[in-house]
Image (spheres, grey):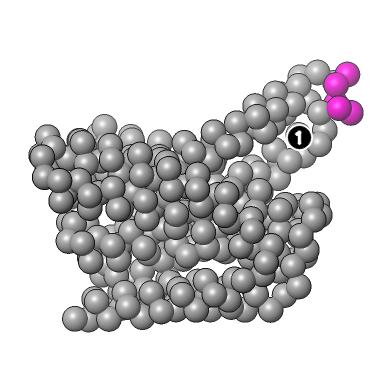
Amino acid sequence: MSILEAIKYLILGLVQGVTEVLPISSSGHVELMKEIIGIDASEGLLFLVLVNTGSLVTLIFIFRKKIINLIRDFVLFIFKKASREKTRPNFDFGLKLIIASIPAAIVGLFFQDIFDNMLLEYGTLISGVGLLFTGTVLIFINYNRFRNGYTDLNFIDCIMMGIAQSVALFPGISRSGMTTGTGIKRGVGVKTALEFSFMMYIPISIGALLLQVIEGLKDGFQVPSVYHYNYYALAFVGAVFATFIAFKLVFHIFQRGRLNYFGFYCLAIGVLSIALFII
């Protein structure tokens, strides 16, 4: 087992965790870091499964109480009429999550393989284009006046945020940036938009994870060497830790209305990514 390789995978996990939460694109940064530190982008599906699961596990842990209450009240609303007045708020919220997840589910089923092949063939060129798009959108959104309270969101807001999430399946486009930014643009409060954005991430990520696991079981999880299980475990732990830390910071970042900084950062990283591909 190489210490240098272990450090590389730990770095990738940390990058995945931070950039999954912050509005700067996890796919774009992981692809760029693979190029910079010299890790084969096509080495296998197991790495992608574990590193993405790290962020998912953390967010499920953070929202565990809300998730349990949502599932309980959703079921009670359907099967126990006497409790509907009490359980309606969580039922409506769950319904909004389902509606918001539909666009990304459709795009993922029909276009995810195309996006994956594009990323495999063109690497940092594709992710760089996505980062440029992300940066432009963040700068544009930053000129809106943010509402910091828990303003509610309606079903149209949910549909628009769901469409934004489907757009973010393109490599290099930030999911959290697109979804939260869309909510803010429509006048939803920062806290509400952020919480709904991360709750949206959970079902669509679970769906994507299941598809990856099914594909891996069918075709086999090819691992370059037995030592890579240790490397992947380090990447997983790094993603869990970094996601938790970034989540604690992201609310302050959005509330202060400093998205333009992240926008300019994404533009710079997008140009660097494209330049690396050309070189």
Badge 1 density bin: few <14, some 14–19, many ≥20, Cα 10 Å: some
Q: Residue at x 55, y 49 (%)?
A: 247
Q: Residue at x 24, y 76 (%)?
A: 276
- Predominant SS along the magenta part: helix
Disc 1: which residue: 90
Residue 83 is inside the magenta segment: yes
**Residue 124 found in image quarter:** bottom left
Q: Residue at x 69, y 62 (%)?
A: 255
Number of marks drawn: 1
Range drawn in magenta: 82-86
From this viewpoint, is residue 103 visible? no
| Front in this rendered view, residue 152 or 259 | 259
Rendered view: 137 above or below 13: below
Which x, y percent locates residue 41? Answer: 22, 57
Element on which disc 1 rests: helix
From this viewpoint, is residue 253 visible? yes
Residue 279 is inside the magenta segment: no
User: In the rendered view of the protein, which quadrant contains the C terminus?
Assistant: bottom left
Q: Residue at x 72, y 75 (%)?
A: 144
What's the amino acid at mark 1?
A: Asn
Which x, y percent locates residue 75? Answer: 71, 24
